[in-house]
Amino acid sequence: MNVSRREFVGLAAAAGGLAAVGPAVAAPGGKLAVDFAVDGAPHTPAEYAALLSRLAADGIGVDEYSRGGVVERLEARFASLLGKEAAVFMPSGTLANHLAVRTLCGPKRRAIVQEISHLYNDSGDCAEQLSQLTLMPLVPGKATFTWDDVARVLERSAGARVVLPVGAISIESPVRRLHGQTFDFGEMQRISSEARKQGIGLHLDGARLFVACAYSGRGPAEYAALFDTVYVSLWKCFSAAGGAVLAGPKALLADLYHVRRMFGGALWGAWPYAAVALHYCDGYLDRLGAAVRVSEELLRVLSSDASFSVERVPGGTSFFRLTPKTPDLPAYRERLKARGITVPPPEAGGFWLRTNETLRGSSAAAIAEGFRSALS
């Protein structure tokens, strides 16, 4: 089912309520407690330790070198959520993306990526230096490339003096460097269909995939079905202190824990990450849907106020830019903090804010009043 953003963000209420798990959403005494600086639910070290203690009281099966125990339960849960046969815990998204593309490429050493993607920009050339892959970047500064873009690379690779076939296509969506802009879904479908005809592996860097779902109305498995493998971050949405999950076919991932160890990624005890992520994943889309409803109303209110300028990202998700009419943004940020509203440091005259589930326990009117009252 494909529904509009407005229709989708009302689904949680129609379903009869939110899941009980999730972060505290209001401070004592009715004070605001919203955080626009993070993707998930923020924890101090003490709060994280207290949560682990509560989860341990209910029983946590410990793993051994990231195998078994609650890690195995986490892998099974995310495989189910993503509609895949299997999943493997990874200590980081960097390793998850790298090993996915490495595995999909096999002997075909070229992989197509977005020029602005995390794998191409933020992984220290790991694919090139550690796995002898050649990343072929497309469409500088854009979220979406087309099958025609891919076809031109395939034609050049096949017709070169030395034939260098493409083994994999990796797509990041939403794109972090474009403040959560998504890859066009129709083009994603076309690329998936054409690549499969040619035996090219497909990987989705879906670090914030569940955020995209909250805005598009599509389920995680609907996106994941277009790809062989998909990576999801455990800390961006699911509030763990670290970690990632890579999901895909059982035959492809069956021995990947050996490669994970070879790259130094077999943590002796991954249960502190897995237990918290497992705690937060159930009901997450319901909770985020409630937060999105608050956010959409907040943006409507602030957009109608001459004291603020609001910028939405075309094809975007949870990020938006707020520019308040005040001369001292650092001081304004501190006044917001005193009112229970956390925002990131200012950039170029404004703030890049993001919606997360901390908004769901407050009203848009109360948050808007906090932004207004902090102006002076």
Image: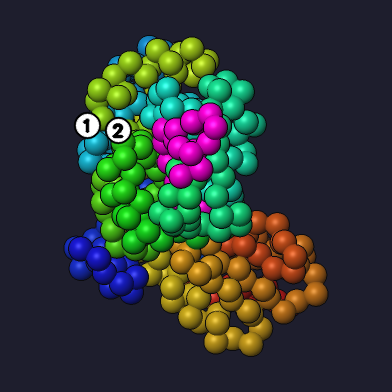
Q: Are marks 2 and 1 in contact (CB under 8 Å)?
A: yes
Counting from the top left corner in percent of width and height, residue 232 is at 40, 40
In the rendered structure, does residue 188 fall within the stretch colored magenta? no
The magenta stretch is 155-175
Q: Which residue is mark 2?
A: 248
Q: Is residue 96 visible?
A: no
SS class, disc 2: strand
Q: Nearer the viewer, residue 307 or 262?
A: 262
Q: Is residue 162 left or right of residue 100?
A: right
Residue positioned most to the right: 327
In the rendered structure, does residue 157 fall within the stretch colored magenta? yes
Q: Nearer the viewer, residue 322 or 162?
A: 162
Q: Which residue is mark 1?
A: 85
Residue at point 28% right, 49% down?
193
Given the image, on which type of amino acid does mark 2 rest? Gly
For the C terminus, the image quarter is bottom right
The local crowd at label 2, few if under 14, some if 14 to 19, many if 20 or more residues have their Cα within 10 Å, is: many
| Inter-mark Cα distance, 2 to 1 | 6 Å
Residue at point 27% right, 43% down?
197
Q: Is residue 292 left or right of residue 122?
A: left
Given the image, on which type of amino acid does mark 1 rest? Glu
Q: Nearer the viewer, residue 222 or 163?
A: 163
Q: Nearer the viewer, residue 88 or 123?
A: 123
Counting from the top left corner in percent of width and height, residue 291 is at 40, 63
